[in-house]
Structures are given as structure tokens and as C-alpha cells.
Image (cartoon, rainbow, N blue to C red):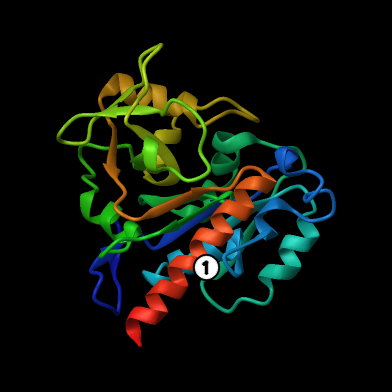
Amino acid sequence: MVIREKPNSFGFVPDRAMVLAAGLGLRMRPLTQNLPKPLLEVGGATMLDHALDRFDDVGVSEVVVNTHWLAKKIHAHLERRTTPSIVISSEEELLETGGGIAKALPHLGDAPFYVANADIVWRGGPTPALVRLADAWKDDEMDALLLLTSTIRATGYVGDGDFMMDPVGLLERRPDRFIAPYVFTGVQIVHPRLFVDIPEGAFSINLLYERALEAGRLFGIAHDGDWYHVGTPQAIDQADSEILEREGSRVRMLF
């Protein structure tokens, strides 16, 4: 695992990351008719900036952002940032999650890297979630390590959960007609070897998760902070009010 020590107290974290920002945001219409979903604001910042700020906080130096819908607006927005360094991976046609990461692999190197969706907002607990992921990564045992959150505590999420997790973090898919205790947050560490022998063009990363599940190489850790799935206009309002309220409470505690 090729990683570098950061000039901070966090120890070792992957040096590169990717934010998946190419989606059409159809469930957010009409808000996304003229503005790409990653640039919608929640809690005082765009969802894209929330993700980039979390990576910047732990010292990730380079982040790939894939774009498609209203890409020029995302490009213009990113020009205002100075850190982390941004690489754009433009998609003329949507490649889905797996295809989008596969296209960006030349920019991501041969070491494990972070991936985050651009339609979520997460806040860490006592230790940043990205650091906890890096601390839990075992290169000889894992091809992907997912940050999971409690299904019943997932703000803005409506569903029956995604995964069962054993005491060492090994994952299994939710059985039919069951409610799983954990839902995938959209934040993860993956190794490039996960993308060996992949289909051409568009495909979901779930295809690769299935391979890793069969090989016993898909793991997870439980998130100990807040997580917001921002998939609809109503979810924006809910996340916005909760984040601003908690930020206000934190400031009041400091003073």
C-alpha cells in the first residue's frame, strides 16, 4: 500500500481520492434543471465542497472529479479552490459509478484511494471518518472498505439497508425481506485491483462489490458521526436545518 505520512496528527491516509459528480440529479428536478446536483448548497456549502473539504482536512493532495451534466458549471466552481489539487475526468456519456472510476484510474495511481459520492454530506465523530477508514484498511485482506452507517440513523435515507457486518467487518448483502442494520454511506477506500477484468463502458460498482463479496474481500466499518443522504429537495431542507442547528450548538458550546 503506497501511502504517505501527512504533516498533521492523522498518520497515514491515501494520497488520492475521487468524487463522483457526473449524475443527472433527476430526482432533484427542478433544482437541477440549470444547476448540477453537486453544486446544490446544504449547511452553508455545496455538496461537492463538503466532500472536497473532508479530503482536504486529512491531507489528501489530489482529487479526481468526474463530470457530465452541466459540466462547465462544475469546472468553473472548482477553479475557485486552491486545495486539494483537482483533476477533471469528463464523461461525454454517463459511465455510472464503476465505469466512471475505471475511466479515472490513470489519475488515481496504483495504491488504494478514497471515493465519495457527491449527493451526501457526512460529519466525523471524534476522529475523522476518512482517518478511521485508513486505519482500518488491511491491504492483504481487502479490495474495498466501505463506510457504513446505521440504517435507522441515516438522515434522508428511505430503505431497508444494504449490508450485514460481522465483528471483523466482513460484509454480506441484506437477505430478502430483511432490514439490514447498515446502509452504505457512499464513502470508501478501494484498491485498483478491484477493477481487473471489468466491462467496457458504463457499469455499476456493485458488480465489483459482488466479486469482492464472493472472494471475502469486501469489508466495512461503522460511521460514528452524522450522515445525510441528499437525494430529493425535501432532503436538502432536512439536512440543511440539522447541520446548521448542530453547527450552532457546537459554536455555543465553544463560547
Residue farthest to the right?
A: 34
Q: Would residue 234 appear left or right of 159 to someone viewing this image?
A: right
Q: Could you say which is closer to the camera, residue 155 or residue 122?
A: 155
Q: Would residue 160 appear left or right of 36 to someone viewing this image?
A: left
Residue hosting label 1: 244
> Relative to 185, does residue 170 appear above or below in the rendering?
above
The quadrant where residue 166 appears: top left
Whether residue 123 appears in this view of the structure is yes
> Relative to 10, does residue 171 appear above or below in the rendering?
above
The quadrant where residue 167 appears: top left
Q: Residue at x 25, y 65 (%)?
A: 126
The quadrant where residue 175 appears: top left
Q: Horizontal and vertical percent for residue 51? A: 51, 60
SS category of the residue bearing label 1: helix
Q: Horizontal and vertical percent for residue 24? A: 74, 42
Q: Residue at x 43, y 43 (%)?
A: 154
Q: Horizontal and vertical percent for residue 76? A: 75, 69
> Relative to 52, does residue 67 appear above or below in the rendering?
above
Residue farthest to the bottom?
A: 255
- Hey, what amino acid is under mark 1? Leu
Query: In the picture, which quadrant includes the C terminus?
Result: bottom left
Q: Residue at x 41, y 80 (%)?
A: 251
Whether residue 197 appears in this view of the structure is no
Q: Horizontal and vertical percent for residue 207? A: 48, 24
Q: Could you say which is closer to the camera, residue 99 or residue 162?
A: 162
Q: Residue at x 34, y 56 (%)?
A: 225
Q: Could you say which is closer to the camera, residue 221 or residue 217?
A: 221
